[in-house]
Image (cartoon, helix red, strand yellow):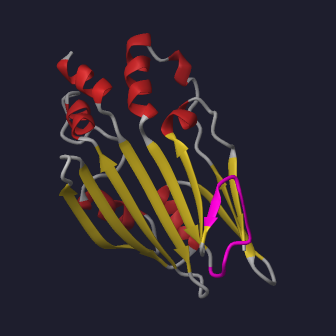
Amino acid sequence: MTCISALILSSCLSLETIIRLKKNGTVTARLIYTIAPEMVDFGRSFGSDEPWTLPLTEKDFKQQALRVDGVDVVGYRAHKLADESERIDVKLAADSFESIANYLDLDLGIKREEEGGSLIFVLPSVDNYEETEEEWLEIFDTIAEGSVFKFAFEPPSKPISVLPGKIDGRTAILEISLRELLYNEAPKTWEVRW
């Protein structure tokens, strides 16, 4: 019960994915996970050293790269922040956009046109989340409420439109809460045109 109280007082999971598509078709990606200490402890209370479905260790990322052709882990850093949160920062290099989409297991598609192109990202959805036991639903809702999913995409040329989201210089950005994803309140797709 102490762990649950700690979660309610301070819950935060931030997942940031930054993808840069170069003119030659290669891709760099950066994954930044920031996990509040209470969440790390909460996950481990289930009796496993690595309870999260997210990859967290360098070994996890490298094993995924072995399963997916065309992607290399080029950097990994895990460290504690001043507030005791854990930050995991991973840098990837891929030979194609399809390779990085497969590596991340996300429904991402690129359509190239004579001038420019577009990205379509079909956001993940969670089926039957509302059917979770009430006690666990309350805990997971609390965790999700302060948690954020941020996706940033830098196409080979400046974006001209993004729906939904915003454009910041050469980068298109989508930011939604994990609660929106869990309850299927998030947009179904994200489109960036350049």
* Viewer-closest of 28 and 142: 142
Is residue 178 placed above or below 194 in the rendered structure?
Answer: above
Residue 50 point in image, percent of width and height? 23, 42
Query: Which of the 4 image quarters holds residue 73?
Result: bottom left
Apparent side of residue 176 relative to residue 141 in the rendered image (left or right): right
Apparent side of residue 95 relative to residue 116 in the rendered image (left or right): left
Question: For residue 168: magenta?
Answer: no
Is residue 168 placed above or below 146 in the rendered structure?
Answer: below
Query: Which of the 4 image quarters holds residue 147?
Result: top left
Query: Residue drawn at (69%, 52%), measured in percent from left and top?
Result: 164
Residue 138 point in image, percent of width and height? 41, 18
Say which quadrant the N terminus sits in: top left
Question: For residue 159: magenta?
Answer: yes
Is residue 101 placed above or below 45 in the rendered structure?
Answer: below
* Viewer-closest of 55 and 69: 55
Say which quadrant the C terminus sits in: bottom right
Query: Which of the 4 image quarters holds residue 174?
Result: bottom right
Residue 128 point in image, percent of width and height? 57, 23
Over which residues does the magenta segment extend? 156-167
Query: Residue drawn at (51%, 79%), measured in percent from left and top?
Result: 95
Query: Residue drawn at (75%, 79%), measured in percent from left and top?
Result: 116
Q: Residue furthest top?
A: 134
Q: Residue furthest right?
A: 114
Residue 119 point in image, percent of width and height? 68, 65
